[in-house]
Structure formats: structure tokens, C-alpha cells
């Protein structure tokens, strides 16, 4: 890229980098590192044709995701919110790519920008909400692991 003086580097962080996510210590801190790192690189290569971007999505419907939006009946309000806030990976990528070269840091998706602004509260308030969400996800993960272990034991 340097000899060509051109290129695009897109690093994938996460919205978990915006907050101090209890129970997600390694993930959240690593994602914060990616974000910080990308910003520094973009400064270091400021006078070149190389573009840096860090993408910090909220939830995207990938194979990583255990709860699919399609789980809800398609006519329900939950389904509407779920598909609005949890895009399919292709939809997400299509929209995120439109922002390359325009913005160094982005959630990549309009509905996720709304979520980020909603959580841009004073730290104490944001922490209160994020802690509740983290705890809820942790409890669900523990329950899921217990279900999987029980299934293994019974087979
Ligand atoms: N999905 C979300 O809601 C979400 C939200 C925020 C941030 N992110 C971030 O987005 C990134 C992608 O996540 P995703 O949801 O798209 O997950 P995913 O669907 O599970 O995709 C992960 C990809 O990483 C590859 N991979 C995993 N371990 C690897 C290894 N050791 N070496 C090389 N490749 C490896 C996998 O390859 P194979 O297909 O060969 O297994 C797969 O292509 C992650 O960094 C995640 O933290 C995701």
C-alpha cells in the first residue's frame, strides 16, 4: 500500500468498545484497542492515500449470533425492532461500505448509530444500562451452556 500510496484498511471493532462492559472484559478491552489503534494509524498515514476505518457494530445477524431475528413471528413488533436493529450481515456490509473514506469511526449502520447516540449518556447512567444488558447476556449464555451440557449428558 505504501509504494502504491493507495489502499483501504477496515478494522472490525464493536460497540462494546464504547463502554466498560462488565463480564466482557477481554472482548470489550480488545475492541477498544482496535479502535484506538486504527485512529493512531490513520493519523500516522494522514499524508498518504491509505484510508483507515474502524467499524463498531451493535448486533449483526451473523453465524456468531445465537438469537436470530427470524425467531420472532414476522408480524410481531419484536420482529420489526429486531430486523431494524439487527440487520443481516449482507445488508450491514452494504451500508457500512458506503461510509468508507468519509468517516474514520462508525457503527456502520444507521440503526446502530441511533443506538450509539441513545447510549451516549453520562458515564454513570450508561454504565447502569450497559451493566444490566451485560448481566442479561451473561445469564442467557450460562443457561444456554447448561442446556447444552444437559443434552450431552443425556445422550
Ligand atoms: N455479529 C455481531 O453482532 C458483531 C457485533 C460487533 C462486532 N462483531 C465483530 O465482527 C467480527 C466478525 O464477527 P461475526 O459476527 O461476523 O462472526 P462470524 O460470523 O462467526 O465470523 C467470524 C469469521 O472469523 C473467522 N475466524 C474465526 N476464527 C478465526 C481464526 N482463528 N483465524 C482466521 N479466521 C477466523 C471465521 O472463519 P470460518 O468461517 O472459517 O469459521 C469467520 O469467517 C468479529 O471481530 C466480532 O467481534 C460482531
Image (spheres, helix red, strand yellow):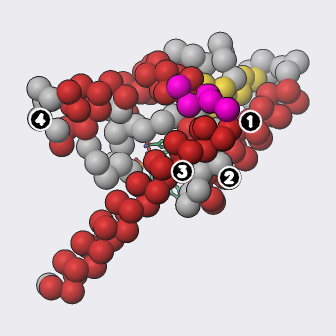
Residue bearing the label numbered 1: 38
Query: Does 140 appear in magenta?
Result: no
CB-based contact (under 8 Å), mark 1 and mark 2: no
The residue tagged with tag 3: helix, strand or loop?
A: helix
Mark 4 or mark 1, earlier in chain? 1
Q: How far apart are labels 4 and 3 at the CA level?
A: 29 Å
Query: Does 119 appear in magenta?
Result: yes
CB-based contact (under 8 Å), mark 3 and mark 1: no
Residue bearing the label numbered 4: 73
In front: label 4 or label 3: 3
Q: Position of residue 153 (x, y in %)?
A: 21, 86
Q: Which residues are magenta?
A: 118-122
The residue located at (57%, 16%) in the rendering is: 99
CB-based contact (under 8 Å), mark 3 and mark 2: no
Q: Which mark is residue 131?
A: 3
Q: Main secondary structure of the magenta part?
A: loop
Residue sitting nearer the eye, 133 or 57: 133
Is residue 41 rendered to the left or right of residue 109? right
The correct choice, above or below, for 138 with respect to 3 in the image is: below
Q: How far apart are labels 3 and 2 at the CA level?
A: 15 Å
Q: Position of residue 18 (x, y in %)?
A: 64, 38
Mark 3 or mark 2, earlier in chain? 2
Characterize the local packing of mark 1: few (<14), some (14-19) or many (20 or more) Cα atoms within 10 angstroms: many
Characterize the local packing of mark 2: few (<14), some (14-19) or many (20 or more) Cα atoms within 10 angstroms: some
Mark 3 or mark 1, earlier in chain? 1
Q: Position of residue 127 (x, y in %)?
A: 61, 44
Q: Which mark is residue 64?
A: none
Amino acid at each position: 500500500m505504501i509504494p502504491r500510496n493507495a489502499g483501504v484498511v477496515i478494522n472490525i471493532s464493536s460497540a462494546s468498545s464504547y463502554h466498560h462492559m462488565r463480564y466482557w472484559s477481554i472482548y470489550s478491552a480488545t475492541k477498544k484497542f482496535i479502535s484506538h489503534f486504527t485512529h493512531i494509524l490513520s493519523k500516522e498515514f494522514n499524508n498518504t492515500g491509505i484510508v483507515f476505518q474502524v467499524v463498531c457494530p451493535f448486533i449483526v445477524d451473523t453465524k456468531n449470533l445465537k438469537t436470530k431475528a427470524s425467531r420472532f413471528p414476522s408480524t410481531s413488533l419484536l420482529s420489526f425492532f429486531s430486523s431494524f436493529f439487527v440487520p443481516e450481515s449482507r445488508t450491514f456490509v452494504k451500508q457500512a461500505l458506503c461510509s468508507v473514506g468519509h468517516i474514520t469511526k462508525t457503527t456502520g449502520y444507521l440503526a446502530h448509530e441511533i443506538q450509539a447516540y441513545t447510549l451516549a449518556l453520562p458515564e454513570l447512567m450508561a454504565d447502569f444500562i450497559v451493566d444490566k444488558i451485560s448481566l442479561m447476556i451473561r445469564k442467557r449464555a450460562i443457561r444456554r451452556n447448561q442446556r447444552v451440557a444437559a443434552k450431552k449428558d443425556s445422550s
